[in-house]
Structure formats: C-alpha cells, structure tokens
Image: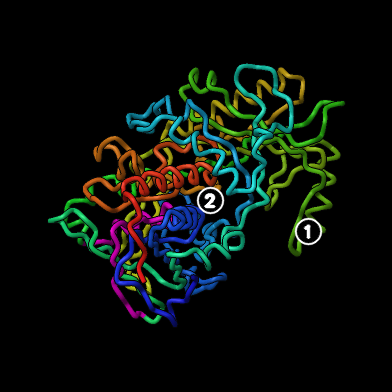
Amino acid sequence: MIKDYQSQKELRDTYDFCIVGGGPAGITLALRLAGQGRHVLLIEGGGHEYSQNSQALYTCTSSGLNAYAEETRLRYLGGTSNHWAGRCRPFEPSDFAIPPPIGLPGWPIAFSEIEAHLPAAMAILDLPPDTGFKTINASMGDKDFEADRFLLSTPTRFAQKYASELNETEGLDVFLNCNCVDIEFDDKTHRVAALVVSDYALQRARVVATNFILATGAIENARQLLNSDSLAAGGVISKDGFAGRCFMEHLNMSLGTFILRDGQSTEPRQYFTTDAFVAEYRSGKGNVSAQLLDEVRSYGRTAAIKNFFENLTCEIGMAHKVDFITKFYCPGDGVITTLIEQFPNRESRISLQEERDELGVRKVNVNWALRTEDRQTIKCIGLEVAKCFADAGLGYVKLDESVYDLTLPPKVNPHAHHMGTTRMASSPEFGVVDENCKVFGTQNLYMAGSSVFATGGASNPTMPLLQLALRLADYLNQQAGPVVGRYS
C-alpha cells in the first residue's frame, strides 16, 4: 500500500528488504521481491507529483562540465521515467568483452548475464517482444558505421503503470516523502543495521531490514554512501576509494552541419559505430544523428532583425563568415548530433561539501570531467563520419572546429544519463560493488540502477539498468531462501 510518510508512519519492526528510491529500478525490484513472498519496504523521497521541496534536494555545485543534475533528474514517485523520452537500444557483446583502453577494467560479468533478462525488461517497458530492434535508414555502406537500431517505449511512466501493483501487492509497503538521511553500519558484523529516514518536518525513524538496496540514481547513490560516517569508520568508504568516482554521461554535442546532395532523402538518419571502428581507433562507441532543419528558428525581441540578416546571409552564401549573437542555420542545412560513450575516469566524480541540505545531509559537488581519450573519440567519429557521408554520396559535412582541434574547449552537453559512480568490479581496487551489486565490505548493502555500470557504451541506460535490476532480484530471492510465512 502507498502511504505518505508525512502523515502516516506505521513502519513494520523489520523487513526482508528495504529499497530506497521509487524510480524504474526501485519499483521493479520492489514488485519482483514482494511478488516472491518477501516483505518489502520501498521508500521514495518525493510524493506523487513534482514538488520544489523534494526537487531542491538535488541541488549541487559543479566544478567541471555542467551536468545540470537538478534540471535533468526528477525526485518523485516514478523518478526520471516521468520525463523519459523512451528510447531503448540493447548493449552488445563487445560492451562486456572488450575493456576500455584506459587502465581500468570493464564489466566483471559476461554479456549473457544481462542478455538473459532482455525479454522481461522489454515487457516492463511495453516494447514489442518479437519484432527486434529496428533501423530507420540504410547503412552508409562502409566498415565504420552501421545503421543504428532501437525501439521507442510509449514511453512507460512507472508510477502510472504500476500504481495498482504498488497499492495492492501483499507484503509491500510504499512510503512517499520518506527520505534516507543516514546509513548505520555495524563494522563488527559488516552489516547495515538500519537506515535513518526523515520526513520534511525532520521527524526521524530507524528502518530495520535484512537487506538494503539503494536505487536513487548515480549521483544520489554515491551521495548516500559518502554521507554515512559509519561506512567511512568501518573502512567501506574511503577518500581514495571508488565511491563517487567514474561519473559518466553520454556526450551530447553538435559535430557540425551538412548539406544533402540533390535527390537524397530528407528523412532523419541515425548511424552507430561498428566494433571494427572501435578496435581500429581504440575509441568509445557512438550514435550519430543527421537531421535536416526545415526552418530558421529565432526568438526574443530581436527575432525580426535576426530573420532579416539570416535570410540575406543564407541567400548570398556567407553564413560561415557571419557571427551573430546566437548561432543559426540556413534553411536546408542539417545538423549532426551525437550520443557518445564516455570512458570511466577517476577524476570525474561526486564529492561531499560541508554545506548540508534542509534534511541535514551533506550536499555534493559534481566534477564531470573528460579524458583525453574522450576527445579523441569525438574527433575520430567526427572526421570519419564526414568522410563516410561524402563517400556514400549523401552530401557534404562541415565539422565544428572543437571536434578536430583539441586545443579548443569541447562543446559538450549532457544527455541526463548518469552512470558509474558505484561501478561494478571484481575487487574494491577498481569499483564499489561486486558482480552481484553488493557493496564491497558489507554483507547486506546493494546498489541498483546505472550507478553500477562499469562502462556506459552508447546505449540509453533505462533498459540495461532494468536488466540488471531483474538479475539482482533473482539473486536476492535465491540468497534469501524459501519463504517461511508472512507477518500478521
């Protein structure tokens, strides 16, 4: 049953599982575990709808590239699925077989471990089960780029789709406006003894469970670990450890513009790097999207003036020589944008500040940083896609200078795909959780969601994180053993 912790605080004395975070991973885990007869508590810091007091708890500073954390993540039931666009693309075998070329290992599990849960994840996301992932255009006919393949979810809004199950599943308690503010770790047993939770009036309580799972997103998962003094005192979290490190995003940037040759289709095109390309250039993977602009868009009080000069400049072919207040594209131009893999980087990280939020939890700083290898990936993809575009007879590409001139600052924006801050590894030397998503040094604390990603690939993370959540649910059910009865 769904209850509001602000007014109803009837927690059980103990649970089999306590899950923090009511987004796609948390909801999936809660329903799977409760469906197997477990007693499950799902706590969500927000309510049924967006509220500023909940969203404000995402506020953080930025010392690197701006990840726009507060603007891109949502903190209420359903999580960021509430504004998810629905794009789904599967990971590939090479994502798990080939480690990144940067001195850190890749995934410690085989591709088959996640592939086995693809059908169930597709069903959760309302994707057609038997049609396969589709392409919208032909390949450019070379070894470097193939036609990208993906499916679009409706998109699935988890709070709406699973409202009845969250209310009616036996053994499942869901509390809204219930925030985790501390993790109590017992270093003698190596177990989390309890979580401390709070409402917005600062009324606190302890939640006791056999197992605890954090599913609050990559920034908040790391923040919860770093904020726990008892985890630090027990040696689970350390200043030099991986908790909060290797924050990854998919790189969203304009590679440049293009003009189609006469007779070419004006439909949008999407391409994806091949394994041969990645091996040859030792690069990350990437999607490249080419879309023709139908009209000039200008805004603000100077729109009429801008339109006049834009039209005049385009007509006489001098657009490349004119620098307006805001960039514009001539009618008929196309724009090439990307979704590019970022390599794990220890210096790209979440760290604590001294300042605390209104619940007493220390705020975080996000230092989203790229490696030199990431800039090389952008450059290789940009140069080769321009060459292949021309060789295929599609048209001509003009790259942005920052793509090939690495002395210029990168013009990179986020895709709101936060990953990697509690990365999966074979040992704490290279990560935070083991192959079963259990935090190293603990017996009963687990992580769910894209924070456990060892590498990000160039796939949208929602479907893969659900595959991992389903895998974790199976593991936890197996570890918990037979159900012996329910509480009264």
Q: Residue at x 23, y 50 (%)?
A: 442
- From what the image shows, is residue 460 above or below residue 357? above
Q: Which quarter of the picture shows residue 355?
A: bottom left
Residue 416, numbered label: 2
User: Where residue 304 sits: x, y (%)?
Assistant: 82, 58
Q: Which residues are magenta?
A: 202-229
Residue 120, numbered label: none
Residue 303, numbered label: 1
Q: Could you tell me if residue 256 is visible in this image?
A: no
User: Where residue 219 sits: x, y (%)?
Assistant: 41, 55
Quarter of the C terminus within the rendering: bottom left
N-terminal label among 1 and 2:
1
Q: Residue at x 65, y 47 (%)?
A: 153
Q: Is residue 337 left or right of residue 227?
A: right
Q: Nearer the viewer, residue 66 or 179?
A: 179
Q: Could you tell me if residue 481 is visible in this image?
A: yes
Q: Which quarter of the picture shows residue 471?
A: top left
Q: Does the magenta portion include 192?
A: no
